[in-house]
Every structure is written in C-alpha cells, then in structure tokens.
Image: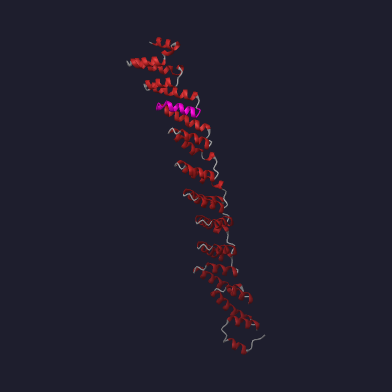
C-alpha cells in the first residue's frame, strides 16, 4: 500500500509514534516505519515499560545495532540510580552479553536479601542464573542471621538450597545452642536441632562443655539433666567427673566420691591413681586413720601402702623427725629389712649429737623388740 499525500499530511498531526510506525509499515515505507518505531522504543525504555519495548523491537524487527547503544545507556543510567533490577532486566530482555547485566542482577539480589525479602531475592537468583560463587559468602551470613533470629525453617532451607557446608551449619548452630543451654532454654535448643535437622550427637562438644560447666560449679542436677537429655556417654565426661571425685576424696566426703564412681563408671585405674596420690599426701599430714579408710574403700594394694609408708619413713628419718618416723613404722608394721639403713643412720646421728634419749627410743622401737640378727648387728656397731 502506497502512502498518499493526504495520508502523509494527516500523520503530521498524529503524536503517537507507534501509530505512525504501523502506518508507514503498512505502506511499505520501512525506513520511515523504523524511524518512528525506534523513537517509541526509546520512550518505552525510559518509562520502564520493557515488555512494550520488547514487543516493538520484535514487531518492527529493529536491528540490534539500531538500539544497542541506547539500551546500554539506559542500563547504565538505571545502575547509577540504584535501579539494579530494572538494569538487569533491560540487559537480559535485549540480549546483551551477561557481563553487562549479571552484576546488576547480583546487586538486586543483595538488596532484597538485606531487606529480608527472601522470596523476591530467590526469584532474581533463579531468573538470572546468578553464579553460586558470587553469593556464597552472603548466603552464609544470611543463614547465620536466620539461626540467630530463631527462623530455623528458613535457615534450613538456605543451608540446603545454597549448599552451606556442614561445618558452617554446625558452627552457627553450636554458637546458638551454647547460649540456649547456658540460659536453660532447652525447648529452644531442641527446636534449633530439629529445625536444622541436626542430630544431637553432632553437637556433642557443646553439650559436653555445658555438662562440664555445670558439674564443675556444683550444679549436679543440671549437669545430669544435660547428660541424659543429650545422651552423653560416660567416657566423654570422665575428665571433669574425676576432677570432682578428686575434690571430694581430698575433703573426705567419701559417700559422694563413691557415688561418682558408680554413676559414671569411672575407670578403676584412674580412681586408684587419684586415691594413691591422696594417700601419699595424707602421709605428710600423719593422717593415718584416713589412709586406712581410703585404702579399704578403694581397695588399694597392701604393697602400695607399705611402699608409700617406707618412703615417708625414710624421708622423716633423713629430716631427723624420728618420733614421726617411729609412729609410721608402728602404724604400718614396716618390715625391718626395708628400713634398717635409715634406722641405723638415725641411731648413729642421735648418738653422735648426744641425743641419747632419742637414740634409745629408736633402738627400742625399731630394733630391740626382736633382736635376732639385726639386734646383734647393732651391738657390733657400737
């Protein structure tokens, strides 16, 4: 259809560029048609009516080079004004290279995330196929934020959807769980584990630490609750229980120390080692009654008691604490063959220093009761 002069004159008074473009297209005047189509295309881009702009480009088959520079300029203008979503859509709709518009899509994603408009952000991420490595760190922060705000379902979704590493999930969960347990918020602690689908055994370190904190401070009921609720094995808490066991046995609170052995299945060799150390300390205090009691309560071997007594006896003799040494010898019935040298040295020291009464005491208590070979040896040494 050819345009008439009358038609051209009427078009001068028409302000609608799209109508003009269609008129000249129908009249096979494609150059004129594209001229008006491009003007309308620019107007729609400015107005943000991208769908209409896209329709015009397709309807009039506008060449890429005819609109490309303008599209780029509008994209940059929107970026500068912080309209990142619009900038990204312009780039995608008009098939610019991804490096031109993906950065804007990332900015739009970040903006919605920071405003906690998560569904909109997720939509942007999928629509523009934002590379995972570009948003990974941000999503870790978002995961931790949702955990801290007790939005466990959203946190679990983010952890799964954005492949947050198990280590990161556990780390964030541990921090929150530790706070809950410290303040007795056990229901919230359970919701945390259930919401993130984390087995309680995976958080054993936190629960064990909480048990130890309570147990060490004397909150045995609270510690017991934590242990049972989180199914903490006895061996995981033996170190702190043994510490408390040591405290009670030193304080001679034997009913508690015996209960700890039973309740926590404390290893016999550890219990024995602690009891033996306590006994050694008691020898220095001459607390023989408690030594006998501990020896009986914790089944310490006779050889250990005898050897410990012999060792202390010799130390006392060397330090010239002869009365104490004699008491130890009589209390624990020390064999003469193991103490003879110390006895003879003590006796000689007393004789040389003119402490005749002490020398006589050593002779009477340590040698004369059963003279035999050793008594004769003493006589020869005079």
Prevailing secondary structure of the magenta residues: helix
The residue that appears at 50% across and 42% down in the rendered structure is 224
Whether residue 161 sits left or right of residue 114 in the image: it is right
Q: Residue furthest bottom?
A: 6
Which sits in the foreground, 57 or 224?
Answer: 224
Which sits in the foreground, 198 or 2?
Answer: 198
Would you identify the image quadrant in which residue 61 lies? bottom right
Relative to 179, say whether 98 is above or below: below
Which sits in the foreground, 86 or 262?
Answer: 262
Q: Position of residue 159 (x, y in %)?
A: 56, 55
Report the number of discs: 0
Residue 235 sits inside the magenta stretch: no
The residue that appears at 46% across and 30% down in the rendered structure is 277
Q: Residue furthest left?
A: 354
Relative to 358, say whether 7 is above or below: below
Q: Position of residue 252 (x, y in %)?
A: 44, 32
Would you identify the image quadrant in which residue 379 lies? top left
Q: Residue furthest front?
A: 255
Question: Where's the C terminus, which quadrant?
Answer: top left
Which sits in the foreground, 27 or 342?
Answer: 342
Q: Position of residue 297 (x, y in %)?
A: 49, 29
Whether residue 227 sits left or right of residue 339 in the image: it is right
Would you identify the image quadrant in which residue 164 lies? bottom right
The residue that appears at 47% across and 32% down in the rendered structure is 274
What range is drawn magenta here? 284-299
Question: Where's the N terminus, which quadrant?
Answer: bottom right
Residue 295 sits inside the magenta stretch: yes
Q: Residue furthest right?
A: 1
Q: Position of residue 355 (x, y in %)?
A: 33, 16
């Amino acid at each position: 259809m050819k345009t008439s002069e009358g038609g051209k004159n009427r078009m001068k008074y028409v302000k609608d560029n799209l109508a003009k473009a269609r008129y000249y297209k129908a009249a096979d005047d494609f150059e004129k048609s594209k001229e008006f189509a491009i003007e309308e295309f620019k107007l729609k881009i400015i107005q943000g009516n991208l769908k209409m702009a896209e329709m015009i480009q397709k309807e009039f088959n506008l060449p890429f080079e005819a609109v490309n520079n303008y599209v780029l300029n509008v994209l940059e203008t929107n970026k500068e004004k912080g309209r990142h979503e619009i900038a990204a859509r312009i780039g995608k709709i008009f098939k610019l290279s991804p490096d031109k518009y993906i950065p804007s899509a990332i900015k739009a994603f970040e903006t919605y995330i920071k405003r906690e408009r998560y569904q909109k952000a997720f939509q942007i991420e999928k629509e523009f196929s934002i590379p995972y490595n570009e948003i990974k760190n941000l999503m870790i922060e978002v995961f931790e934020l949702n955990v801290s705000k007790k939005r466990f379902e959203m946190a679990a979704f983010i952890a799964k959807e954005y492949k947050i590493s198990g280590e990161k999930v556990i780390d964030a969960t541990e921090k929150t769980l530790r706070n809950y347990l410290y303040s007795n918020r056990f229901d919230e602690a359970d919701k945390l584990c259930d919401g993130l689908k984390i087995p309680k055994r995976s958080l054993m370190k936190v629960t064990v630490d909480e048990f130890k904190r309570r147990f060490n401070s004397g909150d045995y009921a609270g510690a017991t609750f934590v242990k049972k609720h989180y199914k903490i094995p006895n061996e995981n808490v033996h170190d702190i229980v043994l510490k408390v066991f040591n405290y009670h046995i030193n304080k001679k609170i034997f009913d508690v120390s015996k209960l700890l052995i039973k309740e926590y299945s404390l290893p016999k060799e550890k219990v024995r080692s602690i009891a033996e150390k306590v006994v050694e300390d008691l020898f220095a205090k001459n607390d023989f009654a408690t030594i006998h009691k501990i020896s009986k309560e914790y089944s310490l071997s006779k050889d250990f008691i005898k050897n410990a007594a012999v060792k202390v006896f010799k130390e006392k003799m060397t330090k010239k604490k002869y009365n104490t040494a004699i008491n130890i010898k009589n209390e624990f019935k020390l064999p003469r063959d193991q103490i003879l040298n110390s006895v003879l040295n003590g006796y000689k020291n007393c004789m040389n220093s003119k402490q005749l009464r002490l020398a006589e005491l050593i002779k009477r208590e340590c040698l004369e009761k059963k003279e035999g070979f050793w008594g004769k040896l003493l006589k020869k040494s005079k």
